[in-house]
Image: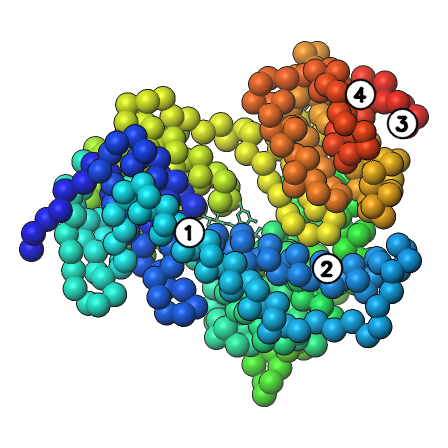
Amino acid sequence: MATENFDVIVIGAGPAGYHAAIRAAQLGLKTACIDAALGKDGKPALGGTCLRVGCIPSKALLDSSRQFWNLTHLFGEHGISAKDPQIDVGAMIGRKDKIVKQFTGGIAMLFKANKVTAYYGFGQLQPGNVVTVKQHDGSTVELKGTNVVIAAGSDSIELPFAKFDQKMIIDNVGALDLTEVPKRLGVIGAGVIGLELGSVWKRLGAEVTILEALPDFLAAADAEVAKTAAREFKKQGLDIRLGAKVSKADIKKNEVHVTYTDAKGEQTIVVDKLLVSVGRRAATKGLLAEGTGVKLDARGMVEVDEHCHTGVDGVWAIGDCVRGPMLAHKGFEEGIAVAELIAGLPGHVNMDTIPWVIYTEPEIAWVGKTEEQLKADGTPYKAGSFPFAALGRAVAMAEPAGFVKVIAHAETDRILGMHLVGVNVSELVHEGVLAMEFSGSADDLARICHAHPTLSEAVHDAAMAVSKRAIHKAN
Ligand code: FAD
Ligand code: AMP
C-alpha cells in the first residue's frame, strides 16, 4: 500500500479537529483531516457532534420552541394574540436539518479553500505516526504524519439498564429528531443537555420529568444562579426531581417504566420517551493500534500535558477526548493552539477563562470562580450583582428574570468570576471573559461606558455594585 505523507494528520473533523486542520493549513503545513461520520442522508458529514447532533441543531430547536413558547405564553403581555397556534414538528425538524446540512457542507468547503485533504472513514493510529483510514467503500489508505492530532470527540454514555434504541430510549441524536411532541418525556440527568433538550419538548407541550441523582441542582454553577434558574424552570412546568437515582427502565408496550430511588424510597414514573443524558465519554474505542505509546486514562480519555501533547513525539490530542470541559469552543482554542505549536509559534489555552453557557430560558452563563469555590479556597472576595428586573431594557422586553453577578478579589479588585442568569446572557458573559483575559478589575468594568438601554448595562451596574456604587439599585 502506498503511503501518503503529510506534515499534519488530524483524526476527527469536529470543532477541535477542523480548527486544528484549517489553522495548520493556513500556516503552510500539508494537512489531512479524517472523519468517519455520516449525516442523516447517509453521506459523509464534517463538523462532528457540534454541527451534526449537538450545539447547532439543539440551538435551532431551542430557538423554534422558544418562538412557540413566547407566542403562547409571552406575547399576550405585548398585546399580541394569535388564534389556536400550532407547531408543525416536521417543519421544525426540517429547518434544523437544513441548517445542519448548510454548516457541515460549509466545513467541506473550508477544507477545499484551505487545501486541507479530507479523508472519509475510520482512522487508527499505528506506531510511528502512521494512520490507517478504513474508508466507507471498504478500502484502506495509509497516511504518515510528522504530526498527528487526535480529535476523536465523545459519545453519549449509555446506562446498562437503559440501552438506546433511539425510538423509546434516546440520547441527543434521538431527541433532536422526534417526529411528534411526546405526551410524557422522562429525562435522566439534569445537566446541560438534559435541561436544554428537556426545555425544547416542554415548550412544545410535553410533560417533562427530569430525574437527577445529585441532591443539588446545577452544582457546578453559582448557587444563587442555580436557585434562580430552578425557580424559573419550575414556573415553566419543568418537573425536576433531585436526589433521584434511576436504576431501571423497562419498555412495556409503548411506554417506558422508569424506576428511581429518592429520600422517599423507590418510585416509578411512566413516560412515552426516555432521554438519557448522563454525560459523555471520549470516543477512543478502536482509535489506537498496539504499540503507539499513547496512553488512555481510566475513563478512556487521551492523556495529555497542558500543551495537549501526548508524550509521544509528534502526537497531540485535543477537544472532548482529553481533560477539561467538553465544550466546542474549548476544542476550537486547543485546535488553534496545537496547530500553532506545531508551526513553531506560541500556542496556549487559558482554561481559567473558558465561558460556560446553558441555553435554557432564562439562559445561564459563567466564567471563572463561583463564590462557593472562592470560599473553599479561602480567597477573600467581594461580589456585586444587579437584577434584570431593575433594568429598563430587560423590562421593556418583558424579560425581567435573573441577574448578573461580578466577583472580584477583596484586596486587588481583580475580577475572579462573572455569573449570569437571564435573557441573552450567552452574549453578556464575554464581557467577563474579556475583562479576565486582560486581568481587569471590577473598577475597570465600572468605568467603561455601556450604551443605554442595553442588557449589558446589567454588567456595568453589577461591576459598580462590587464597590457599593450601583446607581440603579440600593447598595
Ligand atoms: P466531536 O464534535 O465529537 O467530533 C469528533 C469527530 O471525530 C466526529 O465527527 C467523529 O465521527 C470523528 N471521529 C472520532 N473517532 C474517529 C476515528 N477514529 N476516525 C475518524 N473519525 C473519527 N458545546 C458547546 O460549546 N456549546 C453548546 O451549545 C453545545 N451543545 C451541545 C448539545 C448537545 C446535544 C451535545 C451532545 C453536545 C453539545 N456541546 C456543546 C458539546 C460539543 O458538541 C462538544 O464539546 C464538541 O462537539 C467537541 O468537539 P470535538 O471536536 O472534540 O469532538
Ligand atoms: P452532564 O454530565 O452535565 O451531562 O450531566 C449528567 C447528569 O446526569 C449528572 O448531573 C449526573 O449526576 C446525572 N446522572 C448520572 N447517572 C444518573 C442516574 N442513574 N440517575 C439520575 N441521574 C443520573
Q: In the displayed image of the protein, which residue is found farthest to the front?
A: 113
Q: CA distance from mark 1 to mark 4?
A: 43 Å
From the viewer's side, name the closer residue of 110 and 237. 110
Above or below residue 271? Residue 359 is above
Q: In the shown orientation, is residue 312 left or right of residue 305?
A: left
Say what amino acid the circle numbered 3 marks.
Answer: His
Say what amino acid the circle numbered 2 marks.
Answer: Gln
Residue 385 x/y as whole percent: 80, 30
Residue linked to disc 1: 106
Q: Evaluate whether residue 259 shows in this view.
A: no
Residue linked to disc 4: 464
Q: In the shown orientation, is residue 411 left or right of residue 312?
A: right
Q: Contact, CB < 8 Å: mark 1 with mark 3?
A: no
Q: Secondary structure at mark 4?
A: helix
Q: Secondary structure at mark 2?
A: helix
Badge 4 crowding class, 10 Å Cα cut-off, few under 14, some 14 to 19, many 20 or more, is many
Q: Earlier in the sequence, mark 1 or mark 2?
A: 2
Q: In the displayed image of the protein, which residue is found farthest to the bottom?
A: 253
Say what amino acid the circle numbered 4 marks.
Answer: Met
Q: CA distance from mark 1 to mark 3?
A: 45 Å
Residue linked to disc 2: 67
Say what amino acid the circle numbered 1 marks.
Answer: Gly
Q: Earlier in the sequence, mark 2 or mark 4?
A: 2
Q: Earlier in the sequence, mark 2 or mark 3?
A: 2
Q: In the shown orientation, is residue 400 left or right of residue 30?
A: right
Kindly identify the residue that appears in the image at 89 percent across and 27 percent down: 472
Residue linked to disc 3: 472
Q: CA distance from mark 2 to mark 3?
A: 31 Å
Q: In the displayed image of the protein, which residue is found farthest to the top?
A: 411
